[in-house]
Each structure stands twice: as structure tokens, then as C-alpha cells.
């Protein structure tokens, strides 16, 4: 009874602010709408429209590819640089807390703020990044990073990975602290090199942490809205190069002026949730299976 009493506030907040809107959006996707007025039962017509009619049938696959690239780029960055920094800080006790705080600060700032700040830094007119390149004689590398399709999405990928780098550093640092030193000492006595100790002892024992980072990074990348919006606008400029699924949802619901905007955007939100949930469950199953083999 006491446990249920303590859980009640959290359950109420989750029900009101997460579960109820989720179920509401799911129900909205099966109706046609006239503005904000529900017109009638549409069955799967809204879902069919997303796959068969313009602009969705061209914009959705492109945006999905951008979301997946965002996930892949962030994962490579976080699992290499993040783990490297975490390992370095774990072995260097001096100034450890300071550097952990510095790496974590961007993670605590709103992605919208981060996006606008980096838009100023990357500005081709007065941005300090291009100015620094010119000062060191690399004028050929100075370019409108967010103004051309070949670099705009990659700029968002790198900024996203940079902002979220603090989370894997903290997580990997805590996981490294939980690995018994006796294992590495025994391997060292057997003649194992540092790389062999990392590959055969440390890395397998980090499976759970890597799994958590992977799942949360995937969810964050697929739901990305604030940062692409701040750096590329609601239209995914330039020429749709920074368009993501959440931006299509935003345009459909609030900017398109479509009569059935609520129904179409709700259908898109439902598909996005099912896709994220399904892939996250696959990742979770794979990680648990790996953990069972290790144990």
C-alpha cells in the first residue's frame, strides 16, 4: 500500500501528460477532420495518404533516411570519442569532475538554444568558424555550412553528437568504475596487452551501457525536432536536406493549412511511435541475449 501511494503521483503525471495524449493521437489518426472538427470515421485512409500521395510519398522516405543518418552519426561519435574520453577520465583522477561537468553542460542546454547558437557560429557572413579558417589560411574550407545540401545535414549530425556526448561519457565512466580491477590485473599477469584487456574484458562488460546508449540515441534521433528546426527551419532547408520526420509532422499539423491536417499528422505520429517502439524492442532483445551469453 505504501509503495502504491508513493508511485501514485508519478503514475498520474505519466497518465495525464504521456499516456492520454498518446492514446488521443492514436484515435485521431482513424478519423477525417475539417479543421479542428471531426468529420467522420476514416479507417486507414490517413495512413494510405502518407504512402501514396504527394508530398508525403517522397518526403517521408527522404526524411527517414536523414533520421537514420542522424542516429548512425551520433552513435559512431558517441561510442568512439565518448568511450575514449570516459576511459581517459577514469584513469586520470585529477580534474575528473571538472571535465565531466564541461562535457555534460551542452547536454543540459535546450537543443533549440544549441541549434540557434551553432547557426550563428556557422554563419558564412560573420560566423567565427569560417573566420578562423580564413585566419589560418584555409580559405577554401570556409563555406556556407548550413546553406548547401552537401554539408547542412552533416553539420546537424555533428552538432547533435557534440551536444549529447556528455551522457555516454557519464554512463561509460560509471560502468568502467564497476569493473573489478582484479580482472585486468589477472589478464596483465597472463601477458595480455592493454588493447587485449579492453577487447576481451572491458568491452564485453560494457554491453549493457552500450545498449542503453544505443537505444536512447536511436529514440532521440528519430524524435529529433528542435535542433533541425533551429538550424534548418521548419521546411528542412536547404532544399529539404535537413528534413526529418518530426518536421514533416510539424508542417502537416501546424503550417500546411490542410483541412485534414490533424488526421494526417496523427497518423504520422502513430507510425513514428510504432517504428521507434519496434526497433527499440529489437535492440533490447539483442542486448539481453548478449548479456545472457556473457553471464
Image: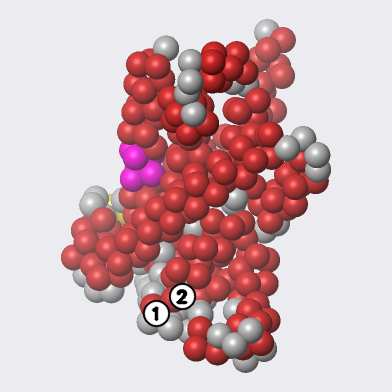
Residue 208 vs residue 108: left or right?
A: left
Quarter of the image with the N terminus is top right
Rendered image quadrant of residue 199: top left
173 or 189, nearer to the observer: 189
Q: Where is residue 3 in the image (x, y as percent from the top left)?
A: 68, 12
Mark 1 crowd level (few <14, some 14–19, many ≥20, 10 Å Cα): some
Q: Mark 2 points at which residue?
A: 152
Relative to 237, residue 13 above or below: above
Q: Quadrant of the C terminus?
A: top left
| SS at circle 2 | helix
Q: Quadrant of residue 116?
A: bottom right
Residue 253: tell me if it is visible.
no
Q: Which residue is drawn at 55% across and 41% down?
A: 83
Instruction: Report the residue at 24% width, 50% height from top.
Output: 43
Q: Residue at x 44, y 70 (%)?
A: 153
Please state the extent of the stretch shown in magenta in the rendering. Answer: 275-279
Instruction: Look at the image and tell me whether residue 84 can be seen.
Output: yes
Q: Where is residue 168 in the image (x, y as percent from the top left)?
A: 58, 41
In the image: residue 45, left or right of residue 187: left
Residue 217: in magenta span: no
Amino acid at each position: 500500500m505504501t509503495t502504491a501511494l508513493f508511485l501514485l503521483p508519478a503514475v498520474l503525471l505519466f497518465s495525464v501528460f504521456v499516456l492520454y495524449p498518446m492514446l488521443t493521437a492514436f484515435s485521431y489518426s482513424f478519423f477525417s477532420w475539417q479543421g479542428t472538427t471531426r468529420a467522420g470515421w476514416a479507417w486507414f485512409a490517413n495512413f494510405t495518404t502518407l504512402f501514396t500521395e504527394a508530398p508525403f510519398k517522397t518526403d517521408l522516405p527522404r526524411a527517414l533516411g536523414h533520421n537514420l543518418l542522424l542516429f548512425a552519426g551520433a552513435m559512431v561519435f558517441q561510442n568512439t570519442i565518448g568511450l575514449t574520453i570516459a576511459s581517459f577520465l577514469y584513469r586520470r583522477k585529477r580534474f575528473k569532475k571538472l571535465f565531466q561537468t564541461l562535457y555534460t553542460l551542452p547536454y543540459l542546454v535546450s537543443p533549440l538554444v544549441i541549434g540557434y547558437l551553432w547557426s550563428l557560429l556557422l554563419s558564412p557572413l560573420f560566423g567565427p568558424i569560417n573566420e578562423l579558417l580564413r585566419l589560418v589560411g584555409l580559405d577554401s574550407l570556409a563555406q556556407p555550412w548550413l546553406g548547401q545540401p552537401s554539408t547542412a545535414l552533416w553539420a546537424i549530425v555533428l552538432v547533435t553528437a557534440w551536444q549529447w556526448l556528455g551522457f555516454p561519457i557519464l554512463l561509460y565512466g560509471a560502468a568502467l568504475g564497476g569493473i573489478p580491477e582484479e580482472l585486468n590485473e589477472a589478464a596483465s599477469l597472463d601477458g595480455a596487452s592493454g588493447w587485449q584487456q579492453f577487447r576481451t574484458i572491458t568491452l564485453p562488460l560494457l554491453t549493457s551501457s552500450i545498449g542503453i546508449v544505443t537505444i536512447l540515441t536511436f529514440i532521440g534521433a528519430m524524435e529529433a525536432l528542435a535542433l533541425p528546426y533551429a538550424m534548418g527551419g521548419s521546411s528542412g532547408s536547404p532544399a529539404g536536406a535537413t528534413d526529418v520526420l518530426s518536421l514533416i509532422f510539424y508542417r502537416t499539423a501546424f503550417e500546411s493549412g490542410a483541412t485534414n491536417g490533424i488526421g494526417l499528422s496523427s497518423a504520422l505520429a502513430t507510425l513514428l511511435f510504432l517504428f521507434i517502439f519496434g526497433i527499440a524492442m529489437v535492440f533490447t532483445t539483442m542486448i539481453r541475449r548478449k548479456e545472457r551469453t556473457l553471464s
